[in-house]
Image (cartoon, coloured by chain):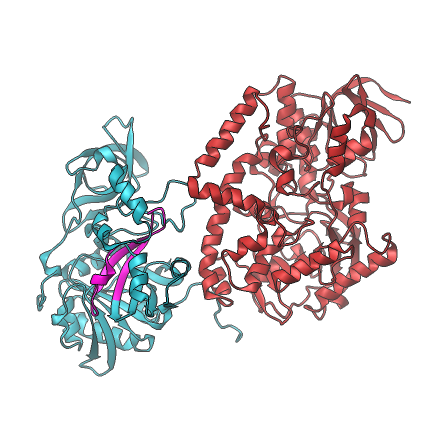
Amino acid sequence: MTPGADTHFTRPLLRTPFHERQMRVSQVDSFVPWSGYTTVDVFTSVEQEYFAIRNSSSLYDVSPMVKYRIRGPDALRYLNRLCTRDIRKLRPGRVAYTVWCDDAGMLIDDGTVFCLGESDYRLCTGEWQLDWLRASAIGFDVVIRDETADLAALAVQGPTAAHLLKGAGIAGIERLKPFEHGEFRLTAPAGGSAPLMVSRTGFTGDLGYELWMSPGDATTVWDALMGFGTSRALRPIGSRALNMARIEAGFILPRVDFTSAAHSLFPGTERSPLELGLAWLVDFGKGHFTGRRALLAEQARGPRRQLVGLDIEGTKPAYQALLYTDRTGRRECGSVTSATWSPTCKRNLALAMVAAPYIAEGSIVWAEIYLNRELQWQRRMVRARVVPRPFFAPERRRATPPADF
Amino acid sequence: MSTTGAKVHDVVIVGGGHNGLVTACYLARAGLTVLVLERQQYVGGAAVSRSLYPGFTYSNCSYVCSLLRTEIIRDLDLPAHGLQIIPYEGGCTMMRDGGHLAVYDNHDAMRREIARHSHHDAEAYERYVRDMLRHCRFIKPLLLREPPDPTSWRLRDLGELAFLARHLYGLGEARIYDTLRFFTMSCADMLEEYFESEIVKAHLSGSSIIGTALGPRSPGSAYVLLHHYMGSIDGAVGAWGFARGGMGAITRAMAASLQASGGAIRTGAPVQQILVRGGRATGVVLADGEEVRARTVVSNLDVKRTFLETVAAGHLPPQFLEQVRRFKIRGSSGKLNIALDALPRFPAIPAGSPAIRGDLHITDTLDMLERAYDDWKAGRWSREPYVDMLIPTQIDPTMAPDGKHYMSVFVQYCPYQLADGEWNEQKRQAFGATVIDAISRHSPDFKDLILHAEIRTPREIESEVGLTEGNIFQGELTFDQLLFNRPIPGFAQYRTPIDSMYLCGSSTHPGGGVMGAPGANAARRILRDLGRGQ
């Protein structure tokens, strides 16, 4: 070790290939850890960053996304046994959002599967899974490799994302359909060139793309996008702005909306995909997959609780609020897992785990919210209505070709 | 025979170790008159700080504080009586080829450290920690409870059994299997369900053999690992670490707490016999013939020393005595306490790494540990011993002069009985030399820095502290000697075959380590029997 050099015990978190560029634009030096990397929480202002997602374009560094390459003669059979969706339907050039469970049908995590070719897949997920992936690989001829550090990744999300990518020098991007991926080349007008894989995926529920590249090309791509984007209100965003958008889009986060069966300590804290409102991802007709028997039993039994969307009165977000059956607050019936004020919908939104009698659309529950009026804390019982998710799903997210502005 | 006037104490406690003091404190707080009788000139038993070389303080028996129950610290107001537990960070296992596996507090640093040896193991470590925490969560509520007798129909036992059953069945099917399996598994089998790297397994299995006459491949060693692991998840900040001023700071605070609530301590007062009249304990006789009378007698001594040496055999049922004789309390550990002129260098540990401030070990593989155990079975000390070394003076400023350091070296394995005849001074020195040579192979300047070394075989631990065979846990922590089987089936609730006589040492549930739980549980049992329980 060179004296003074960083090592894991002096600087435990790794830096992404975009770190240095992001440091230059970070005004408030606010970072959070994500799967072993340090990532930006907020660059300048959460509100401004949020509106870049919904009004123009945003750049979000998703390099820490954990990526596993899964190859080998049994790759398809393996993934189809691992995941709840039918991976056989996934053609090369396509991406699928899926979840995977343990034997008891409890969710381990969610992520996206990229079909890169025959018997060649990439699994992208927020947290490490190698232990489970390897345990699941017994009896399958597959090779699983962690590619996290080999690929830098950048999410470009917002209604002007396609125009921005085109302007930054990625020709043909407008032909990419939702959940497709393809190989592209960035040829920046100001010079600089890089091969990229682009997928039309994201975590905002808006028009958006994810760019996957060699770490050596990261700054070239960043500079090209920022160079063209400055006149179009492009902004790098941190995880806090993204969190508002993902709640509007109804997406769930591990450690926030559910505890992975791989982490749970207390019995009974695990959640099934059915409980998380992800029944549409579970394909009972595809043959055996891990957790199928337990999930079938759960389906037959009916849900005990479910993650639902809540539209809450007032404007104060119901962070971690307990939910009650009526205004008196005598009987609990659930709790809020994620909450935000939605600046676009002008609604007070939340995701909440609610007991079975109250999961139907239109059900009313009461949220216990604490208000801080200049250090004078007040308790409010606020009416909340169960509403469908996503809360915000603009048509533009699906349009092909997308709007060119 | 003299008597101490007409004074009859409510309670006399035989032995001033940490459990004896804990029992005494709780009883004194309940308003009883309590007298603790300690053989040595100082209290503490195996939780002591001693000055054996000018300017240095040694924690010469127990050396880290990981298990002392927060509830006890709080109930007895120990911080107000001077106890300060300071956390330590780091740790490292050094390999013969110069490699190492360090321990870091930071989760990401730890993960990357394991990934240097195996990427898979770095991820499997998360599952390992999860499962260990699950087991700890299962055990922890049982520590400060009296183990129920499964053969009894008394309401209290049935209630406690129901609690245990609810607790177990609350885990759900899969975790019940895991929990039951865990208690009887070997540490090696358990670790092999997670890890592929030899050094990761060897590093983690160290805690499964400390103080135990088991090898990492012996069934039951997985639980010993958990027993050590429990302290590190206490939840309360600072619950894991060094006692500032050495382990004696714990028992000093307990003694002060006892005196503050009216209890008395007599040191230099060795108890020769517990007096029994009509099947009832009535007091004790000291070595000088003085008789101390009491309505209740509590023994902090281990179960063998209590019943085979301190109670006349005629008072005890023969079958009970036979079970006491068979109780496993085997000496397997030695200890070196070393005064150092400066901090020794360990080239395997990277410069600037906090690893050196934690527990340091020397081993490569599970097999190497198992071979060290083979030596013990053959009646000799391990030729390549497993050591648990700590240099607390890097953190605690009170134990050595500036720039100088105290090093505690716990050694596994060292037999109580050697195959080639009795221990003698020459063999004791040879044992010390084996350990010092082993350390020197990883620290070139170590030998030159030694100012003084106290070398303790199981014989010294026994003769000084009174622990039979020098077993640090007052009895092996194997499943046949845990819960309702500890120490003797049918006598797991701190009572004995003699009325108004109790046990409160680590021979009782939940076992050894500077935990205090046996002492606290015994006090609760006594108070209930006296009709003072809540």
At horizontal 23% and vertical 28% (from top left) the residue drawn is: A326
Please report the bounds of the magenta region as a residue range: A85-114
Left or right placement of residue A90 versus residue B180 in this view? left
Residue B32 higher or lower than B448, as above or below: above
Most extreme residue toward the bottom, as rendered? A191
At horizontal 65% and vertical 18% (from top left) the residue drawn is: B530
Residue nearer the viewer, B472 or A100: A100
Residue B159, percent from left and from top: 52, 24
At horizontal 47% and vertical 64% (from top left) the residue drawn is: B112
Residue A127, percent from left and from top: 36, 58
| Magenta run includes residue A348 | no
Most extreme residue toward the right, as rendered? B1
Determine if residue A67 is in view: yes
Residue A162, percent from left and from top: 14, 69
| Magenta run includes residue A111 | yes
Left or right placement of residue A48 versus residue B330 in this view? left
Residue A385 higher or lower than B438, as above or below: above
Residue B32, percent from left and from top: 68, 21
Task: Examine the image and state in which quarter residue A320 appears.
Answer: top left
Chain A: give its colour.
cyan
Quadrant of image for the N terminus of chain B:
top right
Task: Examine the image and state in which quarter residue B120 appears.
Answer: bottom left
Left or right placement of residue A40 versus residue B181 in this view? left
Q: Which chain is red?
A: B
